[in-house]
């Protein structure tokens, strides 16, 4: 009798929760109206010859439970949009040579990445749809035929890779100078399935996909980049495995509070490529280590620095690729 009562109680509680869960799922599946400027951090002023379309990394570290049992950041809330603003402001300064377009999107909270692959893949489709919708709105209303860069880090790069796979026309691809999808990966299966969409840029001038991840030693390679087959060394922009002298590292990007600007400051380190991951042996393994995320990013993994660690190299390379694209 007690077991029957317990089962009945569980079913009753579940039935009460079901409508709210269904409503939440409906809200998450609804489209974001990117004609509403609420959903953009930045809409470039069109004063430059080329654009950056930027997608920020995971900034929502709230737990699933504290997030109202939702896997997604609710970008209708000002405080959630504010979470992303520090990262976007930094990158708008870093890429100040270009018109900077940066949408908000319903990104997955960090805890989503600890779920099973089928669930994670399903969740990623919602975030990817937002990024695709924002990009299509940008192309239709703001681009006006200018060359552009796709720029992202971590989850932002993941969503840009989905955009490359599924969301771009051939005309749009011709305008794309490069897609810097930093801190993520493309697998051999991805290349086989999408050979035209995911064309790696094999040198410092080519149009195409650019990926890099970095560590201080090879034992720190994480699950995020373990199966990558296209990663380059950002000091040479090639897949060569030779050791590159420290002077090829052109400096990291750092915020300077006194000047309220992002500066490129020295960060010399030798580099080499190991299984498509850039090894930086002269940097300290605790440089950006966060113990709470040790399982995914062990000590010596530089994932949290990848978007700014080679800032000088990225800026110089963008100039070179754009110049080559405009020939």
Image (cartoon, rainbow, N blue to C red):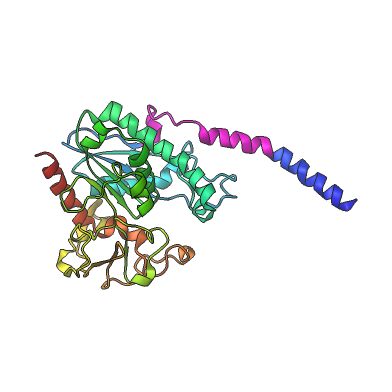
Residue at the limit of the structure toward the front, as seen here: 192
Instruction: Decide which of 174, 72 is in the foreground and name it.
Output: 174
Q: Is residue 21 magenta?
A: yes
Q: Within the image, what quadrant is residue 11 found in?
A: top right
Say if residue 56 shows up in the picture.
Answer: no
Q: Most extreme residue toward the left, as rendered?
A: 327
Q: Which residue lies furthest to the right in this view?
A: 1
At a point 17% along the width and 36% down the height, the residue shown is 48
Give the camera-side residue of 287 and 273. Answer: 273
Q: Is residue 193 left or right of residue 179?
A: right
When asked about the image quadrant of residue 285, the answer is: bottom left
In the displayed structure image, the side of residue 161 where residue 292 appears, left or right: right
Q: Which residue is drawn at 34% across and 63% down?
A: 302
Say above or below: 107 vs 226: above
Is 311 drawn above or below residue 167 in the view shown? below
Quadrant holding the C terminus: top left
Percent from the top left, x then y, of residue 318? 18, 48
Q: Where is residue 236 in the image (x, y as percent from the top left)?
A: 18, 60
Q: How many marks?
A: 0
Please provide the residue range marked out in magenta. 18-40
Q: Which residue is drawn at 24% across and 49% down?
A: 94
Across and down, in percent, residue 163 comes to 35, 40
Q: In this view, does 10 lie to the left or right of 238?
A: right
Magenta span: predominant SS is helix
Residue 16 falls within the magenta-colored stretch: no
* Residue name at image x 46 percent, y 62 percent: 293
Relative depth, front residue between 255 and 257: 255
Q: Where is residue 241 in the image (x, y as percent from the top left)?
A: 22, 66
Q: Can residue 240 be seen in this view?
A: yes
């Amino acid at each position: 009798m007690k077991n029957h009562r317990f089962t009945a109680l569980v079913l009753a509680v579940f039935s009460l929760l079901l409508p709210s869960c269904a409503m939440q799922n409906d809200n998450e599946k609804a489209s974001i109206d990117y004609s509403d400027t609420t959903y953009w951090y930045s809409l470039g002023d069109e004063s430059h010859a080329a654009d950056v379309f930027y997608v920020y990394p995971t900034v929502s570290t709230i737990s699933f439970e504290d997030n109202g049992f939702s896997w997604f950041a609710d970008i209708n809330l000002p405080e959630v949009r504010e979470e992303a603003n520090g990262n976007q402001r930094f990158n708008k300064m870093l890429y100040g040579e270009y018109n900077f377009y940066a949408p908000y999107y319903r990104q997955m909270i960090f805890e989503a990445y600890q779920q099973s692959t089928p669930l994670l893949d399903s969740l990623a489709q919602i975030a990817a749809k937002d990024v695709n919708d924002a990009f299509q709105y940008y192309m239709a209303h703001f681009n006006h035929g200018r060359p552009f860069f796709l720029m992202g880090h971590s989850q932002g790069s993941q969503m840009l890779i989905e955009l490359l796979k599924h969301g771009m026309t051939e005309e749009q691809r011709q305008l794309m100078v490069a897609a810097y999808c930093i801190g993520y990966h493309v697998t051999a299966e991805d290349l086989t399935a999408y050979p035209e969409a995911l064309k790696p840029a094999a040198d410092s001038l080519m149009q195409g996909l650019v990926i890099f991840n970095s560590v201080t030693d090879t034992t720190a390679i994480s699950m995020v980049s373990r199966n990558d087959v296209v990663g380059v060394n950002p000091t040479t922009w090639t897949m060569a495995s030779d050791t590159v002298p420290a002077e090829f590292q052109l400096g990291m990007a750092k915020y300077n509070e006194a000047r309220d600007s992002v500066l490129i400051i020295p960060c010399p380190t030798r580099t080499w490529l190991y299984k498509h991951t850039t090894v930086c042996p002269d940097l300290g393994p605790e440089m950006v280590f966060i113990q709470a995320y040790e399982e995914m990013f062990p000590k010596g993994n530089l994932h949290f620095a990848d978007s700014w660690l080679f800032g000088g190299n990225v800026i110089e390379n963008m100039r070179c690729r754009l110049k080559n694209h405009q020939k």
